[in-house]
Image: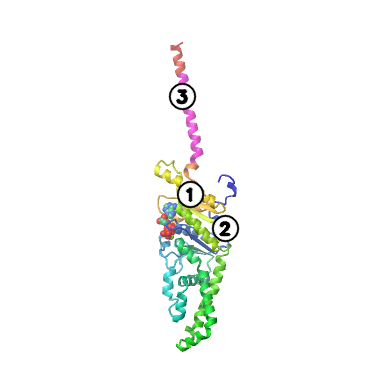
Amino acid sequence: MAAGQDEIPEGTIQNVLEQESLKWVFVGGKGGVGKTTCSSIISILLASVRPSVLIISTDPAHNLSDAFQQRFTKAPTLVNGFTNLYAMEVDPTVEAEETGSSEGMDGFLSDLANSIPGIDEAMSFAEMLKLVQTMDYSVIVFDTAPTGHTLRLLQFPSTLEKGLAKMMSLKSKFGGLLGQMTRMFGVGEEFGEDAILGRLEGMKEVIEQVNRQFKDPDMTTFVCVCIPEFLSLYETERLVQELTKFEIDTHNIIINQVLFDEEGVESKLLKARMKMQQKYLDQFYMLYDDFHITKLPLLPQEVCGVDALKAFSQHFLKPYQPLFTRGTVEELELRVSNLQSLLKDAESELERARKGKQPLNP
Ligand SMILES: Nc1ncnc2c1ncn2[C@@H]1O[C@H](COP(=O)(O)OP(=O)(O)OP(=O)(O)O)[C@@H](O)[C@H]1O
Ligand SMILES: [Mg+2]
């Protein structure tokens, strides 16, 4: 690690802020590692360099409201204290039920739609993205749900494309028959197969566009959040591999909840945890030497509310320097000079004693 220190990418997320072409920023990782905290801070920082920012939570257990201490809904709402930062919380699964995307279709098509796993969720995610696309935000940050769910959502374009292809091939095979069926059952034109296929085809454009954008490293990046522990390291590696498979760019890792040797920690437990963390930190640096790795300190308190988020955001811009290391040189200098003066005192005292003794013991 010590060798070639200069070549290691900078340990901040400055690169994300500087990449002006970025349109989609995903933030993901294992449960409870700090995804919401990090995505909120990234959106706050982006708001200082971009005309408009939207942060979307796709986690059914929304917690943007907790982080910002403000209630959000499925419509973009201005975050208190900002003029260009908006937040919304969407629930893919509920959306699908509400819009009843497969209800209202005739039985055959609805059965067909249901036979493609994840199609409902994918369709509602696509509809949400279509809506967001029209809103013209400069950049959109996603606070995602724990890993498994996120990976499923990122697969949605291929899920939908598969579904669409299946529908289209069926239409070309049984098109005439379908038409006869809808006429036979007296379904009006607007409810007929053409309307349904039209809707899917309308979405096809968005899907293809979003799919293109998600796979374009100029427009999309994925920030992995983790903690320096075995399971998190393991899960990060899995995440990075999956992202590579989906051709989604990722080159930032945030390691949260790091214990720094701050005030010469005495506790045996803390010392042991620090040693354990160091082992995994070393592994992170070894495995991801071409990533920007940002380390964040574990705070004694939660990161709640805009003020706390803003205060914590400084560590996203400048690598964290523990107090102890910062003080080390000065502390050592002070200690050395103290020792020197003590030594001088001792020497002169010894000298005096020797002199004093000499007349007694000539
Ligand atoms: N470095 C830190 N020091 C102290 N507390 C932290 C730190 N990072 C996050 N927290 C706190 O830990 C809790 C969990 O963080 P957060 O909600 O960001 O995690 P998450 O990954 O989004 O969790 P979930 O998977 O449940 O959505 C929050 O209360 C947050 O304020
Ligand atoms: Mg969260």
Magenta part, dominant SS: helix
Please state if 247 lies on the left or on the right of 30 as rendered. Answer: right
Q: Say which element carries label 3.
A: helix
Residue at position x 50%, y 82% in the image:
195
The chosen color scheme is rainbow
Q: Nearer the viewer, residue 41 or 190?
A: 190
Does residue 45 appear in the picture of this structure? no
Q: CA distance from mark 2 to mark 1?
A: 29 Å
Residue at position x 46%, y 74% in the image:
115
Indicate the amino acid at tag 2: Glu
Q: Nearer the viewer, residue 25 or 17?
A: 25
What residue did someone put label 1 on?
280
What residue did someone put label 2 on?
18
What residue did someone put label 3 on?
346
Where residue 104 sits, quadrant-wise, is: bottom left
Does the magenta run of residues contain 209? no
Picture coordinates of residue 335, whole percent (x, y): 48, 34
Indicate the amino acid at tag 3: Ala
Picture coordinates of residue 152, whole percent (x, y): 48, 65
Give neighbour class at mark 1: few <14, some 14-19, many 20+ (Cα, 10 Å): some
Does the magenta run of residues contain 339? yes
Q: Nearer the viewer, residue 341 or 242?
A: 242
First of labels 3, 2 by sequence position: 2
Query: Residues in magenta?
Result: 327-352
